[in-house]
Amino acid sequence: MLLELKQNGSELSGTFKSPGFSLPVNGTAQGTHVTLFVAKHPDRPFLQADLVNGNLQGMRGRHTFNATPAGPNDDLPTVAYIAPPAIQPVPWNGLAKTPPMGWNSWNLFADKVDDATVRTMADAMVSSGMRDAGYVYINIDDTWEGVRDAQGNIQSNHKFPDMKALADYVHSKGLKLGIYSSPGPRTCAGYPGSYGHEEQDAKTLAAWGIDYLKYDWCSASTVYQEKDLQAVYQKMGAALRATGRPIVFSLCEYGLGNVGSWGPQVSGNLWRTTGDIRDAWSSMIGNIEEQVPTAQYAGPGHWNDPDMLEIGNGHMTDDEYRTHMSLWALTAAPLLAGNDLRSMSEATKSILMNHEVLAVDQDTLGKQASPVKNGTMETWVKPLADGGVAVGVVNLGGAAATATIAQTDLPLHGTVKKARNLWTHADVKFANGSYSAEIPSHATLLLKVSTR
């Protein structure tokens, strides 16, 4: 890796490079402490380090960073340009008729994920009841990749000695195994990507028994322009389809290039609409608000993805986590847990495995809710396949407040005959055409309302 910086007073600007990967950065130097950001995430430090004996030592995201001064001949290898294919539609793979549900390794383990961890998570997915609630994908994120052999076939590294055996183990539990790659030369963590090896990698994943691929743009931005997004993702979508194995295709491109308008045409089943989520109220709410203009693109087989769930990771309150779950369900978002399934609290279990809330997310109509904001209250309404609606009222404010839901504001035909609070599992009554309730700060009132 190479970090090139220019300093103007306390202001820093420059480029962070790894093989096939380049990012513009800016930040500040306060004494010997350096903080750098990338433009896409101006509120989230990309690197924090201290100058110690001429070396920069610190953290890049969740990774240790140690940079020594570069010599006059130090540089990074370049890659040959491979032109993207001509645009042509790739048929839908028939998968993800409802939003995918499962678990992903990154939020909790980052680069510490390994074979043993994945096996214990698969065990816990079953023993906790998560599998029976609908969570079936066990997804390995970045840092599993090893080197390519003499024929160019990707191999897993020492953390994953036998990926086929791991897939067999996960399948034996009634679950499915997911994995990660990038259309660029390198992944976000600097491991080998699929650039120039798309068909080869798709065949390898199929041979291992992989059921889900998260495909992260990352270093592709150093080779291609944003206008190339569809063609680049099309290449892997076609390669996966050619294997004959059903593999869910998850596009991770942070919402670039109006992805919803072309995602289905590359056989994409879900696509990121946001940057990476953090276990913080501001991040979670920020990500869900970016869903608002994407609602038209959601539907069976193709879903908008505001990123993984942080529920149970400890930096939000239970009310905030219930809001997290409510909003992901209302927006028909994929539900990929990111917590430790082996040691969940009862509160975390009750949130992740609330069958009435999960039914809203998995509703076969596949509609995404749209919000209306009134002061600190925000109301999301989602049409359901049975003719009813799910209604979520979020209290964005810092104090408890009373919300009123009027029947006339709901897209219903007829008079409300049944309303149910999906978090308390209790029926409630609409009196004189409305229902009122007090909502704590950062909590959500979630109702299912019907005229039947």
Image: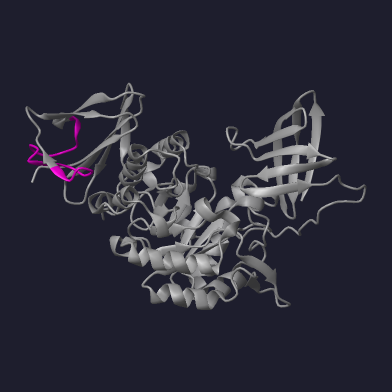
Q: Is residue 100 left or right of residue 81?
A: left
Give x and y (percent) for residue 3. 78, 43
Relative to 132, does residue 366 appear above or below in the rendering? above
Q: Is residue 416 one of those drawn in magenta? A: yes
Work out whether residue 238 or residue 280 is closer to the camera in this orientation and state it.
280
Occupied quadrant, residue 132: bottom left
Residue at 42% of width from left, 69% of height from top?
176
Relative to 376, does residue 265 appear above or below in the rendering? below
Q: Which residues are magenta?
A: 409-426
Residue at 42% of width from left, 67% of height from top?
122
Relative to 424, does residue 398 appear above or below in the rendering? above
Give x and y (percent) for residue 316. 42, 39
Principal SS element in the magenta part?
A: loop
Q: Is residue 273 one of those drawn in magenta? A: no
Occupied quadrant, residue 13: top right
Give x and y (percent) for residue 103. 43, 58
Occupied quadrant, residue 61: top right
Q: How many numbered circles are shown?
A: 0
